[in-house]
Image (spheres, rainbow, N blue to C red):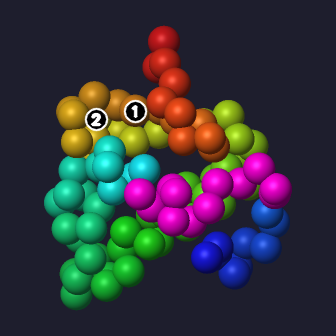
Amino acid sequence: MYDTANPVQSESAPTFAAVYAFLKAHYKHERFEGRNGPIWGEDYAERITRSVIADFTRYGYRGALISRHESANGEAIRFDASLNITSLR
């Protein structure tokens, strides 16, 4: 499932399910699925997932970032389109 408003896709793009599972594992619950609801929108976590996939397709597959405020371990996490955590240094 990809954002239909962004039809640009690549064979190397990770699947929606894989990106969602990665984000769920590395985001604080209250910053990802915990925001699904009437205030942020019932599909908040899905929209974050689509945004990451769109960034990979728009800007290349070098990486994306989960800020330290959103990260489950309290440290910023950079990851690539293969969903490998890469160094911030």
- Look at the image and say whether residue 17 sits in the magenta stretch: yes
State yes or no: discs 2 and 1 in contact (Cβ < 8 Å). Answer: no
Residue 51 appears at what percent x and percent y?
A: 55, 62
Residue in view at x 70 percent, y 41 percent: 61
Q: Is residue 52 above or below residue 84?
A: below
Residue 5 appears at what percent x and percent y?
A: 70, 79
State whether residue 30 appears in this view.
Answer: yes
Displayed quadrant of residue 45: bottom left
Residue 46 appears at what percent x and percent y?
A: 44, 72
Q: Is residue 25 above or below residue 88?
A: below
Residue with the mark numbered 2: 68
Give the extent of the magenta segment.
10-21
Residue with the mark numbered 1: 77
Residue 31 appears at what percent x and percent y?
A: 24, 58
Residue in view at x 32 percent, y 45 percent: 26
Q: Specify few, some or many for label 2: CA neighbours under 10 Å numbering under 14, 14-19, or 20 or more.
A: some
Q: Earlier in the sequence, mark 2 or mark 1?
A: 2
Displayed quadrant of residue 50: bottom right
Marker count (numbered): 2
State whether residue 58 appears in this view.
Answer: no
Left/right placement of residue 10 relative to residue 88 reads: right
Q: Nearer the viewer, mark 2 or mark 1?
A: 1
Residue type highlighted by circle 1: Ile
Which quarter of the figure is the N terminus placed in?
Answer: bottom right
Residue type highlighted by circle 2: Arg
Left/right placement of residue 26 relative to residue 60 reads: left
Q: Is residue 50 above or below residue 64?
A: below
Q: Secondary structure at mark 2?
A: loop
Query: How far is the residue under mark 2 from the one under mark 1?
Result: 7 Å
Q: Residue furthest top?
A: 89
The residue closer to the viewer here, 56 or 84, is 84
The residue closer to the viewer here, 69 or 18, is 18
